[in-house]
Amino acid sequence: MTPVAGVSSGRIAGLALPALVVLAAEPLYLLVDTAVVGHLGRTQLAALALGGGVMGLATWLGTVLAYGTTGRSARRFGAGERAAAVGEGIQASWVAVGLGLVMALAAQVAAVPLTRALAGGDGEVARAAADWLRIAAIGAPGLMLVMAGHGWMRGVQDARRPMWYVLGANAFSAVLCPLLVYPAGLGLSGSAIANVIAQTLGAALFVRALVAERVPLAPHAATLRGQLVVNRDLLVRGAAFQACFLSAAAVAARFGAAALGAHQIALQLWMFCALALDAVAIAAQSLVGATLGAGDTEAARHTAWRVTRVGALGGVAFGLAIAAGTYALPRLFTSDPAVQGQALVAWPWFVAMQPLAGVVFALDGVLIGAGDVRFMRDLTLVAGLGFFLPSIWLAYALDLGLGGVWAGLTIFIVVRLVGMVVRVRGHRWAASGAVHPRRP
């Protein structure tokens, strides 16, 4: 029996539940961070929204790296080549270090002009955001290493160790954050320092696990080149996401600090829901990649539709929970009545998109696990640059407020949903073999 025989609901759950804990840990920490900073004042919350939005670039790029690594590693694992599967993690880690250092250095130079541009003329918010960003960016290499570690461990279907690594690092930092912000008197800078500590501690744990595999740690040119080529399309996709979300923050900022603060609250909750729903997608990446690596295309297709149904049910559950918390949830993050009122403007869109997003995130996992990254790139570019960006800037031009921004996000989800359902109903995505035939 191969390592991927008998894909079932129990097997999906065995990978998805630990992944859910991992995926929920980071946004839960960010929610704690938002709540701690939110009580410092409107300016600090708005600054965190801008600085956190820029740092989201590192998170998204890290997620791209993890997803690309999972697909490659899972195919090797499904073909019975565990050492080669771990080797994909080695090369991904080298990519992670390089990208992280570039981002950390770039933030020291570009923080001030970037936050000024995003703040739309609010100098106080821009200065606070730049200070936060310069400190938080020091943790970028650690963050990228953590994401590379997730990639190869998911590929070899080791879901439990990443769960404990992330829980330990984020729990320590969640306790440290309010201590640094308030008793230590560091204010917004204390939040950034806690972020750096969490990422560095997590990176150390994942690097230790990689060394324990006793495989060669040196860069390998062919494998490294394959990593870069496979991740190229996912990086373009991730860059499109970032352009959209940074533009959304910029538009929200132009409707005032209260709107930007409310956007931060709603966006962090949306990210939490998205990443929690992505747990099923993580299982799909691993299982679809492994079944295709073993040559079982029927099992891959069966898994695809099963995780789609699970994703839809999860999206409905999140939508109902968010609707029930319409008035209570914003109050957890701010006592400012203006920010609370603006949050209610975004809330109907936030609730309505959850069932659709559950399906979208599940199908993301299916197609990334299959290595169908070129299609994913093209679809995201069309949805983001062709629909999302025009929608939110039109909302600004027509003075539609924060509701217009969130209507644009809903359109983004709908376009991607239609494109992926059509793709998975076809057969071109399900190519079998230890290495995808259309990639190195």
Image: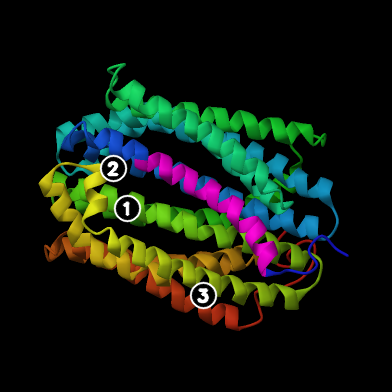
Q: Name the residue under label 3.
A: 420
Q: Which amino acid type is marked by label 1?
A: Leu
Q: Nearer the viewer, residue 230 or 25?
A: 25
Q: How crowded is mark 1: few (under 14 residues within 10 Å), some or many (20 or more)?
A: some
Which label belongs to residue 208?
none
| Number of residues whose C-alpha sits closer than 10 Å to that of mark 2, classed few (under 14), some (14–19) or many (20 or more) | many
Q: Name the residue under label 1.
A: 267
Secondary element at image label 1: helix
Please tell me whether mark 2 sits on a helix, a strand or a loop.
helix
Identify which amino acid the numbered label 3 is placed on.
Met
Q: What stretch is highlighted in magenta?
A: 9-31
What is the x, y in percent for residue 301? 67, 77
Q: How far apart are marks 3 and 1 (CA)?
A: 23 Å
Q: Name the residue under label 2.
A: 49
State which quarter of the image contains the N terminus. Answer: bottom right
Q: Earlier in the sequence, mark 1 or mark 2?
A: 2
Q: x, y (%) of residue 357?
A: 43, 67
Q: Does the magenta stretch include residue 100?
A: no
Report the Cα–Cα distance between label 2 and label 3.
30 Å
Work out whether residue 277 or residue 216 is closer to the camera in this orientation and state it: 277
**Mark 3 or mark 1: which comes first in sequence?**
1
- Report the quarter where the C terminus lies: bottom right
Q: Give the quadrant of residue 386.
A: bottom left
Comparing marks 3 and 1, which lies closer to the viewer?
A: 1
Marks 1 and 2: CB-CB under 8 Å? yes
Q: Tell me if residue 422 comes above or below residue 390 in the rendering.
A: below
